[in-house]
Image (tube, helix red, strand yellow):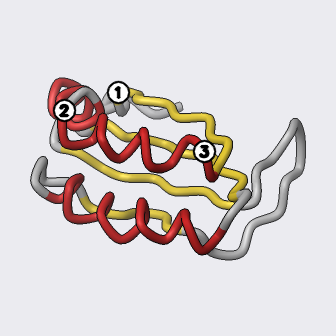
Amino acid sequence: MPAYIIAMVNIKDPQKYREYAKRAGPANAKHGSRFLVRGGKHESKEGTARARNVVLEFKDYETALACYNSPEYARLIAIRKPHADADILVIEGYDGEQP
């Protein structure tokens, strides 16, 4: 069953954040990810929203966790953190009965 990394981000320094963004896509792709959402127009209907939203799909939960926990991605987190505030969620998809 697929799994997802969902990132909601407020960028504080766009120029410095670009280095993270430039390197994150290829690092995630090494784990077979694909972007479902990468920025784009959005409208918050409830709760607190962030300016940028990203959804990556992975083949399964273990692969999504392995990507986030990889040494390569840990280096990218260190690049991102001073220049953006983020809420990151690794979540398993649902493949069950639909209402």
Total count of labels: 3
Secondary structure of residue under mark 2: loop
The picture places residue 6, in percent across and down from the top left corner, at 49, 43
At 52% from the left and 34% from the top, the residue drawn is 88
Q: Distance between the residues labelled 1 and 2?
A: 18 Å
- N-terminal label among 1 and 2: 2
Q: Distance between the residues labelled 3 and 2?
A: 20 Å
> Which residue corresponds to mark 2?
70
Helix, strand or loop status at disc 3 = helix
* Mark 3 vs 1: CB contact within 8 A: no
Query: Which mark's residue is nearer the viewer, 3 or 1?
Result: 3
Amino acid type, mark 1: Glu
Q: Relative to 90, does residue 7 appear above or below in the rendering?
A: below
Q: Quadrant of residue 59?
A: top left
Amino acid type of the residue that numbered disc 2 sits on in the rendered structure:
Ser
Residue 58 to residue 87: above or below: below
Q: Name the amino acid type tagged 3.
A: Pro
Left or right of residue 30: residue 11: right
Q: Position of residue 46 (x, y in %)?
A: 89, 41
Disc 3 vs disc 2: which is toward the camera?
A: 3
Nearer to us in this view, 86 or 77: 77
Q: What is the crowding at mark 3: few (fewer than 14 residues within 10 Å), some, or many (at least 20)?
A: few
Q: Name the residue under label 1.
A: 92
Q: Which mark is residue 82?
A: 3
**Residue 57 percent location from the top left of the image:** 31, 50
Measured from the top left, where is residue 87 in percent x and y?
A: 62, 35
Label 3 close to label 2 by CB (< 8 Å): no
For the N terminus, the quadrant is top left
Query: What secondary structure is marked by label 1?
Result: strand
- Is 64 or 11 nearer to us in this picture? 11
Q: Do the residues labelled 1 and 2 touch (CB within 8 Å)?
A: no
